[in-house]
Image (cartoon, rainbow, N blue to C red):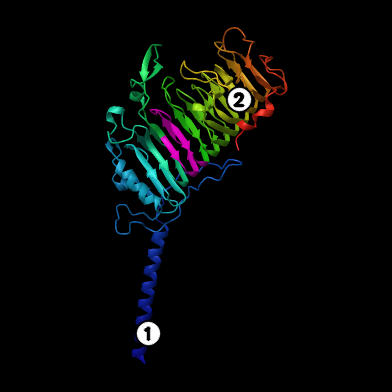
Amino acid sequence: MDLIRGFLFMCITVMLSFHNLGYVEGRSHHHRKQKEVVPRVSEPKDQPPPPSNSPTVPSDPYPNDPEVSTSDGIFDVKSFGAVGDGSADDTQAFRAAWKAACAVESGVILAPADYRFKITSTIFSGPCKPGLVFQVDGTLMAPDGPDSWPEADSRNHWLVFYRLDQMTLNGTGTIEGNGEQWWDLPCKPHRSSDGDQVRGPCNSPAMIEFYMSSKLEVSGLKIQNSPEFHMKFDGCEGVLVDKLSISSPKLSPNTDGIHLGNTKSVGIYNSIISNGDDCISIGPGCSNVDIEGVTCGPSHGISIGSLGVHNSQACVSNLTVRNAIIKESDNGLRIKTWQGGMGSVSGLEFENIQMENVRNCIIIDQYYCTSKGCLNQTSAVHVRDVTFRNIKGTYDVRTPPIHFACSDTIACTNITLSDVELFPHEGELLDDPYCWNAYGTQETLTIPPVNCLRDGEPATVGELSAYECS
């Protein structure tokens, strides 16, 4: 009997030892420190929901490689060999981190703070698992000018994101385009700071481009000194841009802040943009665009177009711009189309806009041309249903603050002005806005008065169905 009792005691002791060992290991795993990810911005009203930035814990894609192994979904580019000293080429490390994060749900590519990563022209391609986050807390840098650009790389692009769904580009860091040397290439004229004619870029890379992607979010970053366009979206649907700072010098040519083409369901919010061209430009094929809380300037303002080039059809619809500031800019709110185009611009609303020393505060130009050889044509993009409400501030007296130059044959229709009050920043009041073949209504007294705006509808309104977009 004593022998049996001794055997049972030994078994129980061994079992308790294994149980306590497992408990200690469990506590150690539970309290492991987790890396933090920047929380996503608030979801805008009536916009498609942006992807979540809260990564789940995926299975380990590199179980036998402790250097790049992750159990919290964060793929730090330094773990893939990035140096981050501002001179070493870290392109391959970013490509490897992208490939690894792309393969897991809610993966995070992290460019950590306090490092400067130089990367060359790269296409970050999908499809990837949903919820992918590219988080830049340090600095990403393009090669320093065309002489440093690899000969094998395209000179039209730097960072391209292609065929992605539910992807986020965010962080607290900076994306630096190093565009200064590109601006002075001998192929496109622009004015230098002393007013002399110099030559600037024509074949220069856009900085950040998204193609054929959906449910995108870009937020929190500082984006600066692009060789050409800072950010482009083409063929995308469901885009949220929030809390960006985009900047380049006033005289940097073709450095549009944000450009949209063939892109639908877009929200651009709470951002500051100063550059050498359009603050935000909206090209053909765009619809359901909401812009609010944006400050532009210096810049060329918020622009729809140019549309209808080379006798093409162009369609833009359902765009709102609210609670914005435009200052020290060559244009304010502009619609520009080429003669000979087809299609329509419709359903545009501009409300609560503050102007500060702006030329052409409100302008519709259906005679847009970049050379001396443009001829007046019978076809044009039809501009209709455009409202300007509570537009106030000051204008540069070198040009009238309101300018409606519509096609000879296809009039602008249903233009509405309400609470428009524009005064000269310096000099005499210009009380002679320009109108040509423009029809609409002044709901309130406008300063300066727009007496040239015609009432009613043009005689050709019944013939416009051929110009409408399906």
Magenta part of the chain:
208-237
Residue drawn 31% across and 44% down? 93
Q: Earlier in the sequence, mark 2 or mark 1?
A: 1
Nearer the observer, disc 2 or disc 1? 2
Which quadrant does the N terminus fall into?
Answer: bottom left
Which residue type does callout 1 highlight? Answer: Leu
How crowded pointer 1 is (Cα within 10 Å; few <14, some 14-19, many 20+) is rated as few
- Residue 22 counted in the magenta span: no
Badge 2: residue crowd in 10 Å (few <14, some 14–19, many ≥20): many
Give the quadrant of the C terminus.
top right
Q: Residue 146 in the image: state x and y as whole percent.
A: 30, 28
Give 138 or 425, whichever is nearer the viewer: 425
Label placed on residue 8: 1
Residue 83 locus on image (x, y percent) = 28, 41
Give residue 429's quadrant in the image. top right
Q: Toward which corner of the image does residue 287 lie, by quadrant?
A: top right
| Residue at x-position 59% and y-position 30% | 345
85 left or right, relative to 279? left
Nearest the eye: 371 or 8: 371
Query: Which residue is labeled 2 in the image?
Result: 353
Q: Position of residue 381 (x, y in %)?
A: 58, 27
Q: Is residue 445 left or right of residue 90?
A: right
Res 279 visible: no
